[in-house]
Image (tube, grey):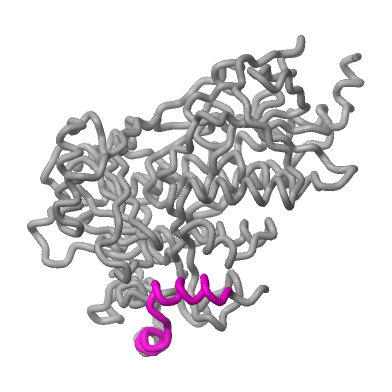
Amino acid sequence: MKKEEAKERRIKEVLIVGGGTAGWLSACHLARSLKSNSPDGVKVTLIESANIPTIGVGEGTVPAIRQTLAHLGIRETDFIRECDVTFKQSIKFVDWIDDPASKDSNAYHHVFDYPERQMVDPTPYWLMGQAGNASFVDAVSVQGKICEAGLGPKQMVHAEYDGLVNYAYHLDAAKFAAFLTKHATEKLGVHHILSNVTDVKLSEDGDIRAVQTDDAGELSADLFVDCTGFAALLIEQKLGVGFIPKDDILFVDTALAVQVPYTAKDAPIPSYTIATAREAGWIWDIGLSARRGTGYVYSAKHTSDERAEEVLREYLRATVGDMADEVSCRRIPMRIGYREKYWVKNCVAIGLSQGFVEPLEATGILVYDATARMLAEQFPPTRGAMDVIADRFNGRVRQAWDRVIDFIKLHYCLSRRDDSAFWRDNRREETIPESLQESLEVWRHQPPSPYDFSSKLSVFNLENYLYVLYGMGFETRMDAISYRYPDTDTAVSIFRQMNATAEQVVRELPKHRLLLDRIKEYGLSEI
């Protein structure tokens, strides 16, 4: 085929190599946008090995996943019933601010409900003390009190994907991948092949032409999506795209994961992730409906694997007693950083093959979902259109990863903990990205504003930063700019109304476990 003819060739087939959450999210987004279940649509095939299990610790999400599920035509009721789902309204950070022994109260919530700015922006008035002793989250949102009361984010009268407050989910990652597999193949027209890839074959122009499998023969396509995890079988091993490590900024590089049962069948389920800081990292604690998923993510440079396991079991003993010594831990090394490029030739990396940072703030599923949807909605109609679209894709995804890294580092560099080298090293200037240093310097003199967060690919925004900055005790000096905020009476009224509203919704919302039980029994109303 001549070069010009090849450029105008329509993209008719996509092959996704690798399953798991990233692979099946990619399959669903592509199949829906490209009408794979119609004769004129683009054929989407996913090949995965039956012998490689899902890593399965990505059990937290952010609110954007609700838009994704609705967009893909998935009923929230089915999702909750089949994936051991619970609601997530916040991340509660415990012992991140100060050394655990130095303070009585050392926790804050990063909730998902955003402060309203209809009359005045409440942030500067909170900074000037107009909300009294209320924490930032309680001054601007009702959701922190909802979480602490053990309540769900909605009532049974709310339709699917609707609620009184914003929310995301906790889920069983393996069940979620299986759920997406069923939806993709039965509803969206995705072809599914179980086989092992043994070789990747290139054409003369450097594009991937096909993959060779052990028992499904040679599989060709026009575009390939690499979802092969840290192995990066296509993007790195075959196309040679390098990896940019970021472990000089984010030190956490190893996880110990464990699943533990509840001590009682009717045990309360927190509607938030608990992230408890420890000497060389932090422990996650996620309550699903049938079990808890917990683990310790830590820096191997700052502790040993043996000490890390001891720290995790000490944490578990406080809630499950001697059972903490019986459960087995799974150790998972993590490669921290991202690709030099994410789309090269006719190959796009999504998932762990694209990049990874620690699971704080559920960044993994967030970025993989956002980039999979962007690929589907910016899909090139021909090979000739691919390179320009790829360049733009690469720029946007790089910006997204850099913003993720800034936001994760924010949690560490604001900590006042001084009890270990891990926390002290996280405050060293040379470990803090210059972009974050510049922002913090500005925010010492004025609160963050929407102008600080213009982005082509939304990841973490103004409100996310506000909750972490002021939850962690960051100080913005308001003396020189207080004259800009004369609406004190209005702000005080807003804070009082927020407190009254919080008391009301706490009386009205159901307990979290009760809400889940009712949804499973009766189902939610469709949108």
- Residue drawn at x 63%, y 64% is 75
Q: Give the percent coordinates (x, y) of residue 432.
A: 32, 39
- Magenta segment, prevailing SS (helix, strand or loop): helix
* Residue 202 visible in the shown view: yes
Is 212 situated above or below 33?
A: above
Q: Quadrant of the C terminus?
A: bottom right
Between 455 and 208, the one nearer to me in the picture: 208
Q: Give the percent coordinates (x, y) of residue 59.
A: 43, 51
Q: Give the percent coordinates (x, y) of residue 525.
A: 63, 77
Q: Quadrant of the N terminus?
A: top right
Q: Give the percent coordinates (x, y) of residue 98.
A: 16, 55
Is 331 situated above or below 269?
A: above
- Residue drawn at x 31%, y 67% is 265
Was residue 10 drawn as part of the magenta stretch in this picture? no
Was residue 510 drawn as part of the magenta stretch in this picture? yes
- Residue drawn at x 42%, y 87% is 508
Image position of 332 (left or right of 35): left
* Residue 446 visible in the shown view: no
Q: Which residues are magenta?
A: 502-523
- Residue drawn at x 54%, y 37% is 351
Is 269 situated above or below 497?
A: above
Is 242 situated above or below 125?
A: above
Between 127 and 26, the one nearer to me in the picture: 26
